[in-house]
Image (cartoon, rainbow, N blue to C red):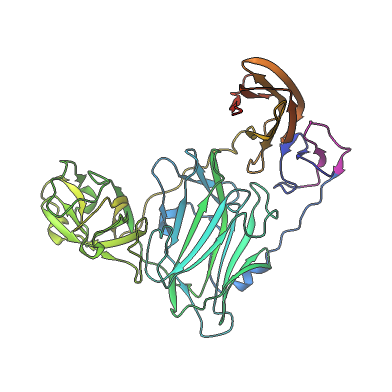
């Protein structure tokens, strides 16, 4: 139906014409006033696994829930919770919203000499409406690269600016970065959607998969598969222990440190250990002089990539070898303080730190939470036309990033706390509405969203209409 605001699929409301499911359910288009079209039968898109043959190397279907044995996950603690989904799938639950998770595969990408030199494939729903998928191919072992990647890195970004309108919320698509002699081609479900005009000089690189859910919603991203060409051998087995610095600000070399440390238990009896940390640079300082203070020991840190940017806001991963005296069975239980220091630190921040010890990780993912409950559309309102005698108010109800939409009853418009208009949208999903209000002078205008379920928390937008 032309002008459809969304769709009803066997009783489920969605904003996109593409959804995940099986079979051929009945579908009705829903307009901005909640009116339904006659039902039609959905078309089921057949699956295609032929792409797997092109990934000549390592292919991960996430059937193994020991994620840490294959990846390092860089994310904000408590705001990105990995889980094992049904059918072999990594589910990243992001309850805080507006967060990014970065997976660094421990298996490297290795390029051949010519032709199609290498390929990285990721099957995910991350690049749906308002979401973002970033593939970074970079020599070294960084945990994240931030907004300014190193000079020799290749960055592929897929979001609403690339092949817009082709991805529904919560729908898996296959994205591939194909390295050739002349460029890096970006492929979605077998069709090229973009290219990056670079040809890497390096032969081996880490693969970083960064995913960002739509803003403003409790986030959830699913990754169904990752494939990397050129590597089949085993990777080094390590166990990670996350540690938190006494202050997240990088200190000057002799600045007083808070008396907060970290437990030494992960290091006891280890044959060796490394400290890895990622910092966000400020407007000065020398990252080549970064050291970690662990009690009385000072561990020099070195960048894990070359060609990194020292610009403010850049993110840099560094590594340092833990001294042998901290690996003994005897000695203190705590290492205090634990801080990072750098000459001219200038507001550099610690993003994450952890010990890496050579042994097989025992950490196993828990089962992922169920699919999130339906959410209300995001409401915005603005005056699009104002004359001395009236004003036109535009209300937009945007449900595009929602995996499933809670039905609406409608919305109300109040002028100076008095009800001025009611727009019913029985069982609606969103859309755009314009109302012409006969108003002179200045007024306070409020738009209140009304969900069909009266027990749901509602939303409102306040506007000030002023004429000078």
Q: Residue at x 60, y 27 (%)?
A: 466
Q: Main secondary structure of the magenta part?
A: loop
State the residue lying farthest toward the right: 38
Q: Is residue 453 left or right of residue 354?
A: right
State the residue lying farthest toward the top: 418
Q: Position of residue 361 (x, y in %)?
A: 36, 55
Which stretch did the figure color magenta? 23-40
Q: Is residue 46 left or right of residue 101?
A: right
Q: Residue at x 50, y 75 (%)?
A: 230
Query: Could you tell me which quadrant the N terminus lies in?
Result: top right
Q: Is residue 88 left or right of residue 419?
A: left
Q: Residue at x 83, y 32 (%)?
A: 35
Q: In which quadrant of the rendered view does residue 115 lie?
A: bottom right
Q: Nearer the viewer, residue 382 or 206?
A: 382
Residue 452 visible in rendering: no
Q: Is residue 110 above or below residue 220?
A: below
Q: Position of residue 315 (x, y in %)?
A: 36, 58
- Total labels drawn: 0
Q: Position of residue 104 (x, y in %)?
A: 43, 60
């Amino acid at each position: 139906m032309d002008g459809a605001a969304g769709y009803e699929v066997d009783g489920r409301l969605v904003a996109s014409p593409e959804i995940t499911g099986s079979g051929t359910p009945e579908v009705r288009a829903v307009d901005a006033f909640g009116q339904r079209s006659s039902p039609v039968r959905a078309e089921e898109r057949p699956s295609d696994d032929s792409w797997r043959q092109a990934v000549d190397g390592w292919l991960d279907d996430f059937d193994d829930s020991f994620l840490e044995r294959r990846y390092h996950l860089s994310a904000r603690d408590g705001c990105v919770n990995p889980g094992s989904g049904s059918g072999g799938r990594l589910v990243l639950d992001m309850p805080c919203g507006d967060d990014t998770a970065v997976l660094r595969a421990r298996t490297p990408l290795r390029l051949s000499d010519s032709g199609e030199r290498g390929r990285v494939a990721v099957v995910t729903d991350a690049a749906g409406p308002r979401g973002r998928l970033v593939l970074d191919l970079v020599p070294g072992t960084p945990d994240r690269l931030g907004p300014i990647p190193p000079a020799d890195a290749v960055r592929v970004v897929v979001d609403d600016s690339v092949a817009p309108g082709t991805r529904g919320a919560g729908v898996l698509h296959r994205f591939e970065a194909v390295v050739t002699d002349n460029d890096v081609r970006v492929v979605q479900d077998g069709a090229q959607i973009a290219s990056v005009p670079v040809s890497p000089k390096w032969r081996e690189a880490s693969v970083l998969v960064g995913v960002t859910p739509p803003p403003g919603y409790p986030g959830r991203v699913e990754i169904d598969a990752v494939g990397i060409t050129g590597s089949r051998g085993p990777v080094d087995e390590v166990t990670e222990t996350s540690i938190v610095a006494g202050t997240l600000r990088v200190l000057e070399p002799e600045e007083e440190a808070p008396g907060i440390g970290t437990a030494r238990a992960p290091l006891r009896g280890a044959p060796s250990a490394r400290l890895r940390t990622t910092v966000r640079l400020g407007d000065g300082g020398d990252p080549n002089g970064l050291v970690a203070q662990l009690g009385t020991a000072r561990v020099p840190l070195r960048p894990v990539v070359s060609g990194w940017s020292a610009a403010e806001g850049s993110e840099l991963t560094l590594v340092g070898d833990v001294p042998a005296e901290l690996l003994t069975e005897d000695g203190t239980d705590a290492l205090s303080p634990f801080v990072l220091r750098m000459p001219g630190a200038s507001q550099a921040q610690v993003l994450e730190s952890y010990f890496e010890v050579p042994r097989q990780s025992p950490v196993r993912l828990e089962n992922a939470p169920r699919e999130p409950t339906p959410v209300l559309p995001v409401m915005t309102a603005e005056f699009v036309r104002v004359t001395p005698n009236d004003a036109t108010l535009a209300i937009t109800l945007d449900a595009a990033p929602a995996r499933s939409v809670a039905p609406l009853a409608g919305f109300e418009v109040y002028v100076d706390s008095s009800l001025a208009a009611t727009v019913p949208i029985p069982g609606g999903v969103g859309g755009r509405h314009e109302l012409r209000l006969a108003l002179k002078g200045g007024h306070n205008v409020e738009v209140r969203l009304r969900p069909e379920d009266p027990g749901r928390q509602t939303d409102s937008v306040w506007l000030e209409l002023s004429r000078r």
